Image (cartoon, rainbow, N blue to C red):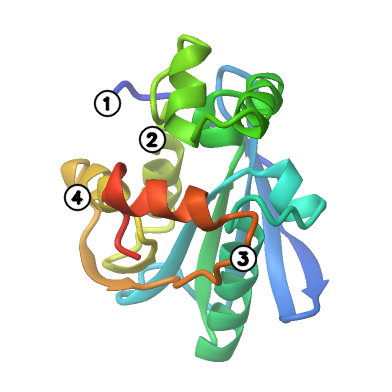
Amino acid sequence: MTKIKYNYSNLANLPTAYGSFKIQSFKDEKGNEHAILIKGDVENRADVPVRIHSECLTGDAFSSLKCDCNYQLNYALEYISMFGFGIIIYLRQEGRGIGFFNKINAYNLQDNGRNTIEANHDLGLNNDEREYSAAVEVLNKLNIQSVKLMTNNPLKIEYLKKYGINVIDRVSVISKKNTFNDQYLEVKKHQLSHML
């Protein structure tokens, strides 16, 4: 993994519907601005609940029913708040890393019968363009000894382990199906091997 230079903002308070967190922004050398939400004292700690969440403007901000991103983010906020400590690393890699513009074009293709993977391929893109080096950087910076990773994505677990993060447990984030995301969740389960 190439070492990327990061620039961190100061910590600030962030009161939420799920309780009080600390928030910090950090910028990588490409200019991407990510966020860290921290609950409680996490530095040098083991068994830390961690959610690595890739940006989803349509889900996170507009409460889209086409995906389960909003549900997963809110589940993580609630879980960490109830647990008393934990971290959410919010990465700016929209649409599984393809960007917002391409994501909306993929949505158009999905409106015409393609599934999420087929739509990406029609646009000349891979199934998933995301990577998690920024998350590894954050966890190392905080000297996190081990994590309880909140994910259904086995590739995310493999990536963290490959780069030395001690993933001791996985916390399932079981999403609710609806008529708009049913096919999306089936594709995640059967074609992307997500543990749903």
Specify whether 65 is left or right of 49: right
In front: 160, or 26?
160
**118 versus 59 height, above or below:** above
Nearer the viewer's eye, disc 4 or disc 3? 3
Nearer the viewer's eye, disc 1 or disc 4? 4
Q: What amino acid does circle 2 point to? A: Ser
**125 versus 195 height, above or below:** above
Distance in Å between CA atoms under marks 1 and 3: 38 Å
Q: Which residue is mark 1?
A: 1
Specify whether 26 is left or right of 139: right
Q: Which residue is mark 4?
A: 161
Specify whether 166 is left or right of 15: left
In front: 116, or 36?
116
User: How many marks on residues?
Assistant: 4
Mark 1, secondary structure of its residue? loop
Q: Which residue is mark 2?
A: 133
Instruction: Report if residue 150 is visible in the image.
Output: yes
List x then y, in percent, for residue 72.
Answer: 56, 65
Q: What amino acid does circle 3 point to? A: Asn
Residue occupying the point 21% across, 60% down: 166
Residue occupying the point 39% across, 62% down: 151
Q: Determine contact: label 2, label 1, CB under 8 Å.
A: yes
Q: Which mark is residue 145?
A: none
Mark 2, secondary structure of its residue? helix
Q: Which residue is mark 3?
A: 178
Q: What amino acid does circle 1 point to? A: Met
Nearer the viewer's eye, disc 1 or disc 3? 3
- Among the two numbered marks 4 and 2 on one chain, the one whose residue lies closer to the N terminus: 2
Q: Determine contact: label 2, label 3, CB under 8 Å.
A: no
Residue occupying the point 26% across, 52% down: 154
Answer with the quarter of the image where residue 135 lies: top left
